[in-house]
Image: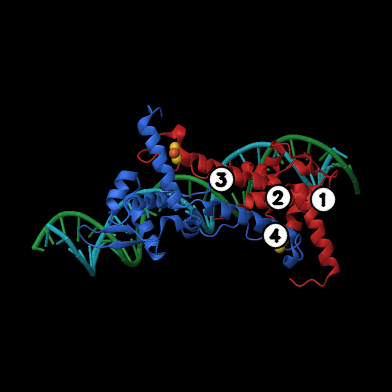
Chain colours: A blue, B red, C cyan, D green
DNA sequence: TAAAACTGATACTATATTAGTATCAATTAA
DNA sequence: TTAATTGATACTAATATAGTATCAGTTTTA
């Protein structure tokens, strides 16, 4: 069971790149090259993120993409929803014969509770937080002898 | 993002049917019919569950499948692992350029923490628990006027 | 003892989702 | 004016999910 698809994975990495260069434009090409993301694939993701007002773009030479939304307010939950749809455990696990009363269904509540937990865990993880974590990692590893 | 696939969904429902008739054999056909599960699909799932010692079978006329493992010890996590593979957030989200030191990686820990949360939430939900919940639902709905 | 009701095993097809590629028009800086 | 860029969109490929079909073997029972 894979929780994050490439869509989301790539989007997060692109956002980290953009967040790190906050205030200036980065081209899709440079992001693709640096982070090993298929160029055209990445471009689609970037456009989707524009539509959701996470980033903005500038066309033409010296153009590119720039962070728009505050990285601390971009949650992994939001990205999952954009690229993989809302988290849902099961459309309705026990329909028909088994579950006779949807309105009162205890199971449904159980399912919704889990959906909630999963969502809120991913909500704790923002692009801002990831970026700061990342800086720590890179600081440590540049000081220490890196054994990978 | 769909957390449970049909595999798991159907498997849970079949197990609930078997758990409810603990001690006697239920044929694949009867389960399929009652719970609206494609017959041949269900049979594959049942065989898989035999291999994992959740249920046992008896061949021939009057044969079928019977609960083997204690329903309270069958977790949804286990079923997800059988039918959808182990929960993994991302194989390794920030490899190469970004993540220079895998061993110390904060992000990796973050990811593993979430994997853990998701897993343990689903671990709280056992077939036994679902069955008891279900009985409550059906009691309530048979007393009340069912508005679906 | 033969037919019917079953499971075991496995191969196959269909559909949907995910991943990746290609193309061309429009914009803009130099 | 040209090269570097995004906007938009259509396409293909690969993989995962869902569902079907078939045949052999076992067991009850008439
Ligand atoms: S699980 Fe869907 S209504 Fe009960
Ligand atoms: S995220 Fe994979 S090693 Fe850091």
Mark 1 surroundings: few (<14), some (14-19) or many (≥20) residues within 10 A = some
Task: Indicate the secondary structure of the residue bearing disc 4.
Answer: helix
- Point out the frontmost of discs 4 and 1: 4
Q: Which residue is mark 2?
A: B12
Say the numbered circle drawn on residue B96: none
Give the mark nearer the N terminus: 3 vs 1. Answer: 1
Q: Residue at x 39, y 42 (%)?
A: A135
Please tell me in which quadrant of the rendered image residue A140 appears: top left
- Point out the frontmost of discs 3 and 4: 3
Q: CA distance from mark 4 to mark 1?
A: 21 Å
The reply to the same-chain question for discs 4 and 2 is no
Give the mark nearer the N terminus: 3 vs 2. Answer: 2
Chain ID at mark 1: B
Task: Answer left or right for A55 relative to C9.
Answer: left
Q: Which residue is mark 4?
A: A109
Task: Indicate the secondary structure of the residue bearing disc 1.
Answer: helix
Quadrant observed for ligand 2 in the rendered image: top left
Q: CA distance from mark 4 to mark 2?
A: 17 Å
Chain ID at mark 3: B
Chain ID at mark 4: A
Q: Nearer the viewer, residue A143 or A14?
A: A143
The reply to the same-chain question for discs 3 and 1 is yes
Residue B116, x across and y down, in percent? 59, 42
Q: Residue at x 30, y 53 (%)?
A: A28
């Amino acid at each position: 069971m894979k929780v994050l698809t490439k869509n989301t994975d790539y989007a997060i990495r692109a956002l980290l790149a953009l967040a790190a260069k906050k205030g200036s434009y980065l081209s899709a090409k440079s992001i693709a090259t640096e982070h090993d993301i298929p160029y055209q694939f990445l471009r689609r993701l970037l456009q989707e993120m524009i539509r959701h007002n996470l980033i903005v773009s500038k066309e033409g030479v010296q153009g590119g993409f720039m962070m728009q939304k505050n990285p601390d307010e971009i949650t992994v939950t939001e990205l999952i929803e954009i690229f993989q749809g809302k988290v849902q455990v099961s459309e309705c696990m026990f329909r028909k014969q088994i579950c006779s009363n949807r309105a009162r269904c205890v199971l449904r509540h159980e399912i919704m509770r889990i959906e909630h937990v999963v969502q809120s865990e991913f909500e704790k993880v923002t692009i801002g937080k990831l970026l700061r974590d990342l800086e720590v990692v890179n600081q440590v590893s540049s000081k220490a002898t890196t054994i990978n």
